[in-house]
Amino acid sequence: MKIGLFTDCTNFAGTERHMLDLACALRAGGEEAEIICPPDAILAERAAREGVPVFALSCAGKLGLLAALPKLRRAARAGRWEVLHTHNGRTTLLAALALRGGNGTTLVTTQHFVHPARTRRRGIVARISNEIHQAVGRHVDRIVAISEAVRAAAVAREAATARKIRVVLNGIRDPEADTLTDPEAVRRGLGVETGTPLVVCLSRLDAEKNLEVLIEAMRTVTAAIPQARCVIAGAGGEQANLQRRIDAAGLAGTVRLLGFHADPLSLVRAGNVFVLPSALEPFGLSIVEAMALGVPVIAVRAGGPQEIVVEGVSGLLVPPGGAAEMATAITSGLRQPDLAARLGAGGRERFLHAFTAARMATEMRAVYREARGGEQPANRRPTGEMNTISRPSVRASHDD
């Protein structure tokens, strides 16, 4: 099957990581998958490095979007793709326009967010946006939701879409240890000594990520474990506000905002625990990354994370906004090596069982075939089954 995975984003975050892992896994399974993205996108460079073909398409801004349309339409009509798989609203609109009139290309789109940007618009802009969305939606053959939380929100907004939605939980390729930086070298680069309890968080610095909850939790953690340190890797518009909170809490030097980090997996592996405080997380790819590395996870009992983490087996879950509960969980993870080792081992087993890129590609391939008129994919595991596996018996492989 010839598949084009399409984004117009030039940055490299969770969606782009998902696309690259999916492309590689599809190709490993015999499909002709390629990436469609701007030539200056970080994804283009990384895809080329992985041996994934790239169809370069510049579509920055409204004029760029219109300029890209003829090239996309010509390629589609020439039969370049059997499935065009988009990953945001702009590319879905462009793909729907390019495929107008029908040429045998199936249009699939993935919904990566619980609340897409259009849901935050108001007034005439919202009405126009919704009308465009509904018009485009008529040309979409299948909608992939990355979690049950995303599916439920989509159906609540527009019940008619339910028949088109299929849930395919994200997966990642198994991190290769020999490609990661030694944990002690990472710690030296951070100025964190061997043996210092280290909390790691990967997150955009946006209000919806609830990073202020982690900052508040660290006040309690450092009262109990004064030498504990926390690093938050990621960029975003809330950086100045978060830094003010850190300073006001007297945590300067204890909680650090690292900005964009070029080697996030090595950073996670260097930590003792991984924390994601977001209560509106559509999935939580960084949670899966930490589990794959055998690092114990602390997340919020909401959205995607509660579909990933098995409480007490592959991590700890705390209530949304629960800074006190988060502090207790972090302190337990730092003070109880046996607990941390057990959760790390459980997370690793959970990853291998449910969140590999190969599993994701198999389920996505079934969605493509169904959308193209083939057999319907087998029923997915019931909602909630993801959180009912037995306690693992494997030993910990966590390095810290």
Image (cartoon, grey):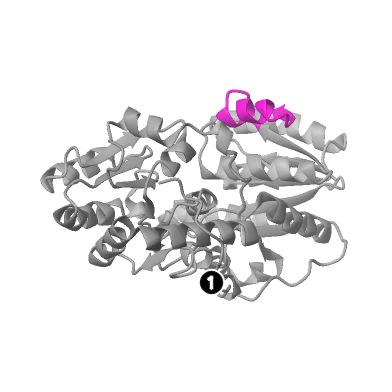
Kind of residue at badge 1? Arg
Q: Tell which residue pokes out farthest to the top in this image.
A: 40
Residue at image mark 1: 391
Residue 251 part of the magenta segment = no
Residue 399 visible somewhere in the drawing: yes
Quarter of the image where one finds residue 163: bottom right
Indicate the quadrant where residue 383 lies. bottom right
Q: Name the residue at 61% across, 33% down.
A: 65
On the question of residue 93 being in view, the answer is: no
Above or below: residue 105 compared with residue 307: above
Along the viewing direction, whichever of 390 and 153 lies nearer the viewer: 390
Dot 1: what SS?
A: loop
Left or right side of 33 for 174: left
- Residue range highlighted in magenta: 37-56
Residue situated in front as seen by the camera: 393 or 82? 393
Q: Is residue 236 left or right of residue 146?
A: left
Q: Quadrant of the N terminus?
A: top right
Residue name at image x 25 percent, y 61 percent: 327
- Write the residue at 56% across / 44% down: 15
